[in-house]
Amino acid sequence: MNIILNGASGCGKGSMAGFLTRDFGLVHISTGDLFREQIAKQTPLGKKVESYVSTGKWVPDEVTIEVLLDRIKQPDCAKGVILDGFPRTLNQAIALDKVLDIDLVIAIDVTDEIVQTRLGGRYMCRQCGTIHAARWDKIDKCKKCGGELYQRDDDKAEFIQKRLENFKKNNGEILDFYREKDKLFIVHDKLENTPADTYALVKDVVAKL
Ligand code: AMP
C-alpha cells in the first residue's frame, strides 16, 4: 500500500505519517527530512539544496525527483510507503506516476490561520527530529529523547507566508491529477483538533483500503 499525504506545511502530515507507520507498518518518506539530513552532513547534495530549504523555497524538480526516486528504490520500501511533502508540483506527480502505484492520496485541508498558528509554534528536536508544539506545551527539551529543541529557519514568520503561497499556486493541479484517477480523499481539519482527532479521520480512510 502506497499513500501520499498532501497538505500545506504545518497541516500535520508528519504527525499523521508517524501514526500510519505505527499502525500499518509503512515506511515514512519525507523529502524535507531527506534534504535536512544531507544538509546536516554537508554532503554535495546538502550544500546544493541548503539555500532553498533554509528560506522556504522549493528545491528544483530535477533534484527533488532524483532524491525521491532513489529513496523509493530501496528494499525497505517494498512493504509500502507514506510520502510526506512529495509531490509538490505536477511534474513531480507525473514522474512518480511512472514508477510507483499510488493507492490513496489523503489531502489534509487546513485554513491559513491553522498553518500560521501551528508552524509558528512548532519546534524540532536537534537530536531525533521529533516535532513538538513547544510554545504551547511549555517544554524546552524533547519529550522523547531530552534533546535540544530549535525552530526551523523556514518556520520563521517571514517565510511561512511565502511557503503557503507557493503551496496554493501548485496544489490545485496536483489534486486534480489524483482526483481524475479516483485516488483523492480530502480530510477537513479544524484549529481545535488535536493530532489524535485528525488521525481518527485519516485512519478510517486507510483502514478501508
Ligand atoms: P518540509 O519538511 O516538507 O516542509 O520541507 C522542507 C523544505 O524542503 C521545503 O520548504 C523545500 O525547500 C524542500 N522540499 C521538500 N520537499 C520538496 C519537494 N517535493 N519539492 C521541492 N522542495 C521540497
Image (cartoon, rainbow, N blue to C red):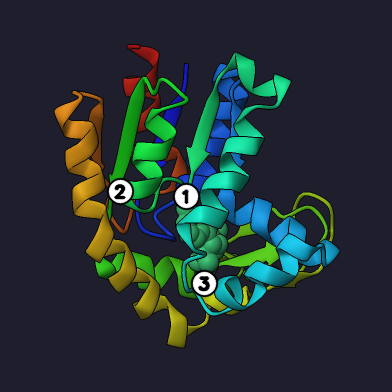
| Above or below, 122 relative to 6 | below
Give the SS element for disc 2.
helix
Can you identify the residue that label 3 sits on? 121
Q: Position of residue 10 (x, y in %)?
A: 44, 60
Seen from the viewer's position, the closer of residues 89 and 85 is 89
Can you identify the residue that label 2 sits on? 90
Tag 2: amino acid: Leu
Tag 1: amino acid: Gly
Q: Residue furthest bottom?
A: 158
Query: How many labels, in total?
Result: 3
Q: Find the distance from the CA under tag 2 to the CA under tag 1.
A: 13 Å
| Label 1 neighbour load within 10 Å: few <14, some 14-19, many 20+ | some
Q: Find the distance from the CA under tag 2 to the CA under tag 3.
A: 30 Å
> Can residue 47 be seen from the camera position used here?
yes
Seen from the viewer's position, the closer of residues 164 and 35 is 35
Q: Position of residue 166 (x, y in %)?
A: 32, 69
Task: Answer yes or no: disc 1 within 8 Å of ligand 1.
Answer: yes
Seen from the viewer's position, the closer of residues 29 and 60 is 60
Residue occupying the point 66% across, 58% down? 35
In the picture, the disc for residue 47 is none
